[in-house]
Amino acid sequence: MNEENIDGTNGCSKVRTGTQNEAALLALMEKTGYNMVQENGQRKFGGPPPGWEGPPPPRGCEVFVGKIPRDMYEDELVPVFERAGKIYEFRLMMEFSGENRGYAFVMYTTKEEAQLAIRTLNNYEIRPGKFIGVCVSLDNCRLFIGAIPKEKKKEEILDEMKKVTEGVVDVIVYPSATDKTKNRGFAFVEYESHRAAAMARRKLIPGTFQLWGHTIQVDWADPEKEVDEETMQRVKVLYVRNLMISTTEETIKAEFNKFKPGAVERVKKLRDYAFVHFFNREDAVAAMSVMNGKCIDGACIEVTLAKPVNKENTWRQHLNGQISPNSENLIVFTNKEESHPKTLGKLPTLPARLNGQHSPSPPEVERCTYPFYPGTKLTPISMYSLKSNHFNSAVMHLDYYCNKNNWAPPEYYLYSTTSQDGKVLLVYKIVIPAIANGSQSYFMPDKLCTTLEDAKELAAQFTLLHLDREHSLFSLDLCRRIWRK
């Protein structure tokens, strides 16, 4: 440890020596009975705790902690996190100098304790003026594999991945929206552990590895968000995928109404998937069991409960490569796999932040159409007189953001390149004239898109997140993502 560190207990700025640090940690170990070891750049407290029998806690029991003062250690941190429940393991990331690296992972014995820690300790003032961030941490066991020949079947991809990597459990392959006999050119490979997935990624990532004569793309798959059981018990919307593009909302509604006429409230279909809204949850659950695996217009459909999304986090997740039209802004449900190859789903909504202040998120504006009767009185208005929840796209939100800050509109500059397979790839550079002479003269995402609309939307999302950086937990998500990789 460092010979000198700052003792931040109760906000003091008193220097304490390395000996005092060690004494404080020894006192913590003696009081709790936990062991502590330091290895591979992290210090582990517990894992397992005294008297623990059986396997480690399941996924969903660990939280990520960021923005920890660099001179704060387990003797101060553990008592804070023990308030939420019994700690199975506390891992503090350490520098060679003896300071911590500003973040840690805390594994509780139950998911409920982890959720309580997030609710009570996220944005907790750990020292005067120092606020920590706490969010869920999940071991990623899934890789995204791109540039797969579209004629390959699931069994062929599974066999091939088992040949070239170890620990493969399953592969997830989605049929093409236009030709159900082909895949979409990518797959998700599930491994038995995060370590197995990491070793496979290390082997495949250089970019020279080929499958069936094709150079494949490899990256971490963006993990599905886990939704607590209490929330899922209230869901009365079904997610239906693998539909034919030609299948209409009317056909879907009629098919799902067969088991109980009038049970379906409405259907929202986008491309080859849909959200089916029911009046009652019981009818939704019953319809799921009846309709899963059935054929509609010749396509065998898959039906699951739709997962509500944490709307504030989905924008930050978009920086990790997700880009899509908004599939269901009324409910904002996940399960969508088409949005981007790296992700199994999720769509963006924007927390309202103007002039650096976080305003309460207004209710979503329902996205639907109404009859326009002759003689209906219309009043001219400016888009800037509307509330932010009337806007669906990041492009509109950015324009609105600039206007509310009395800035000139954002300027978009389009650039292109060509992929290895000859596709034209696009990216926008955005200049905000009002701040162009500041610390950042322009904003440009590190992802390329195949369509103009997606490129513009991604650039706007990227710009909004960076404009809002001081108030965002995105840096925490990024640290966690880098660590897990």
Image (cartoon, rainbow, N blue to C red):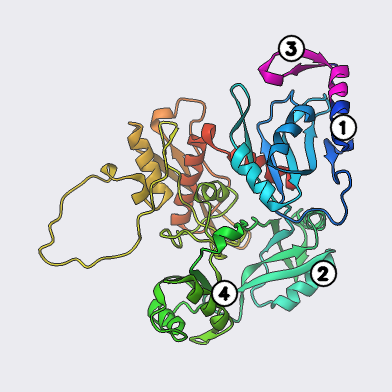
Cα–Cα span, label 2 and label 1? 44 Å
114 inside magenta stretch: no
Left or right, 302 with respect to 349, comes to: right
Give yes or no for contact between labels 3 and 4 (Cβ–Cβ under 8 Å).
no
Residue drawn 53% across and 31% down?
470
* Three-letter code, disc 4: Ser
Q: Which of marks 2 and 1 is nearer the N terminus?
A: 1
Q: Nearer the viewer, mark 4 or mark 1?
A: 1
* Three-letter code, disc 3: Lys
Horizontal and vertical percent position of residue 194:
78, 55
Residue drawn 58% across and 40% down?
474
Cα–Cα span, label 3 and label 4? 63 Å
Please rate how many residues cluster around mark 1, counting C-alpha atoms within 10 Å: few if below 14, some from 14 to 19, many from 20: some
Cα–Cα span, label 2 and label 3? 57 Å
The residue that label 4 is drawn on is 176
Please rate how many residues cluster around mark 4, counting C-alpha atoms within 10 Å: few if below 14, some from 14 to 19, many from 20: some
Horizontal and vertical percent position of residue 101:
74, 31
Which one is in front, 129 or 329?
129
Q: Earlier in the sequence, mark 2 or mark 3?
A: 3
The residue that label 2 is drawn on is 162
User: Which residue is the extreme one toward the left?
Assistant: 375
Q: Nearer the viewer, mark 1 or mark 3?
A: 1
Residue drawn 82% across and 36% down?
42
> Does the rendering let one see residue 1?
no
Secondary structure of the residue carrying tag 2 is helix
Q: Which of marks 4 and 2 is nearer the N terminus?
A: 2
Q: Which of marks 2 and 3 is in front?
A: 3
Above/below status of 461 relative to 157: above
